[in-house]
Amino acid sequence: MNSLTADIIGICGSVIFIGAFLYANISPAMNKILFNALNLVGAVLLLISLSVNFNLAATFLEAVWGCIALVGLISALRSRGKAS
């Protein structure tokens, strides 16, 4: 993958993060599944970008952010299953 493609993928991940943050701040009743799924996708896209344009601090941040989003997504899916 070339650097431009990696940058485009990283920008898409950033846009998804910004969208999730905006959603969390304007939604009267936040859907935790959607919020965590968007954060997970954003983290994965940024990690893909960082695999080409490596930065240790950013890679660490995105890996932790992705793990938190994954745990949140699993928790939200389990809560949804119990409520059904």
Image: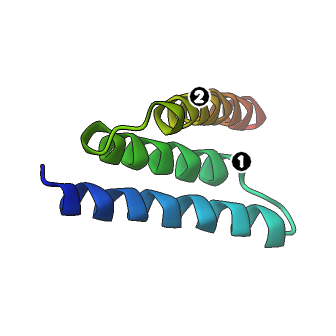
Question: What kind of element bears circle 1?
Answer: helix
Q: Residue furthest right?
A: 28
Q: Quadrant of residue 28?
A: bottom right
Q: Which mark is residue 67?
A: none
- Residue at position x 57%, y 48% from top? 39
Which of the image's four quarters has the C terminus? top right
Position of residue 32 in the picture relative to residue 38 (left or right):
right
Which amino acid type is shown beneath numbered disc 1?
Lys
Residue behind mark 1: 32
Give the percent coordinates (x, y) of residue 46.
Answer: 41, 47
The tag earlier along the polypeptide, 2 or 1, is 1
The picture places residue 10, in percent across and down from the top left corner, at 38, 56
In the image, residue 74 sits, relative to residue 84, either above or below, namely above
Residue receiving disc 2: 64
- Which residue is depicted at the point 70% across and 61% down? 21
Q: Residues within 10 Å of mark 2 (few under 14, many from 20)?
A: few
Confirm or deny contact between disc 2 and disc 1 (CB under 8 A).
Answer: no
Residue 83 spot, x, y in % from top left: 77, 36
Quadrant of residue 79 in the image?
Answer: top right
The mark closer to the camera, 2 or 1, is 2
Mark 2: which secondary structure? helix
Q: Is residue 55 left or right of residue 34?
A: left
Disc 2 marks a residue whose amino acid type is Val
